[in-house]
Image (cartoon, rainbow, N blue to C red):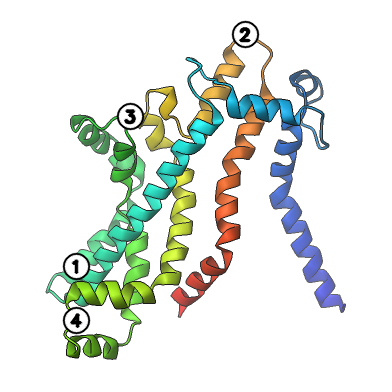
Amino acid sequence: MNRHTAITHFILIIGAMFMTLPVWVAFMTSTHAPETILREGLQFWPGGHFLETYNEVLFEPGGVMKKVTALGMMKNSLILGIGFSVGKVIISMFAAYAIVYFRFRMANFLFWIIFMTLLLPLEVRIIPSYKVVADLGLLDTHTGLIVPLIASATGTFFFRQFFRSVPDEILEAARLDGASAWRFFIDILVPLSKTMIAAILIIMFVVGWNQYLWPLIMTTKEENYTLVIGIKQIYQVLNEGGELPQFQKAFALTILATLPPVLVVLVFQKWFVKGLVESEK
């Protein structure tokens, strides 16, 4: 190993340690008793309460009303993540398809209108979105949780760029074969976009899983909490309950919240990287 390679490896190891150290400390601390954490602070080595803590968090109801478990919150987060990502991909593909292949006069103008919505954070449209969802009676429902979030300027932009890279000869060949617009989209564009779809799905799943503000406003019942807002709510209950603060449970919830996005990225890593690389071409 030459000097340049050794320095590169050293920098990578330091970077990896810097990124994983908070997760390691959270996991190790979650395996200790609350008395130990209160007396000694954060822990760097495993304790003897791993099974006890994670069993309580996963299967015993918590929160103010004692109606929610980590498993229930993970189910809600999973529904939100899948609905969020699938909805964004479908809407983005249709929008990009219309912009690229239906060459109407206002196509570019409408695309840039869509693109400019990137400048509007969720907080700007949170009140009108909440009003619409409340008027439709969709508060505390999965539909109300997912539908207002599925429009995506980022996804539309990536699919537009990808569709523009598809050779025109393919479109001409499809026309000669008599393929309709819908058949061309389903039989040709969707298969060609598989890696792009996979990359966008993974990114959007992680974004959807980590949504905090909208689920916090939308949900009033504990049984509808997602895992991310459940961490905050349960930590607040634990901290203000007049009992010994159960920090190990808050850390356990945090670790559980990181597992599904990490697993999704690891399992679909090949597709994820391939989709991003192809989008750069």
Res. 258 image quadrant: top right
Residue 179's disc is: 4
Mark 4 or mark 3: whose residue is earlier in sequence? 3
Which residue is tagged 2? 242
Cα–Cα gap, marks 1 and 4: 28 Å
Direction from residue 173 to residue 12 in the image, left or right: right
Of 12 and 65, which appears nearest the observer?
65
The amino acid type found where label 3 is placed reads: Asp
Label 4 SS: loop
Label 1 SS: helix
Cα–Cα gap, marks 4 and 3: 43 Å
The amino acid type found where label 4 is placed reads: Ala
Which residue is tagged 3? 140
- The spot of residue 56 in percent (x, y) is 64, 24
Mark 1 or mark 2: whose residue is earlier in sequence? 1
Cα–Cα gap, marks 1 and 2: 58 Å
Residue appearing at x 22%, y 30% in the figure: 137
Mark 1 or mark 3: whose residue is earlier in sequence? 1
Tally the marks: 4
Residue appearing at x 24%, y 35% in the figure: 133
Label 4: how many residues lie within 10 Å, few (<14), some (14-19) or many (20+)? some
Of 100 and 142, which appears nearest the observer?
142
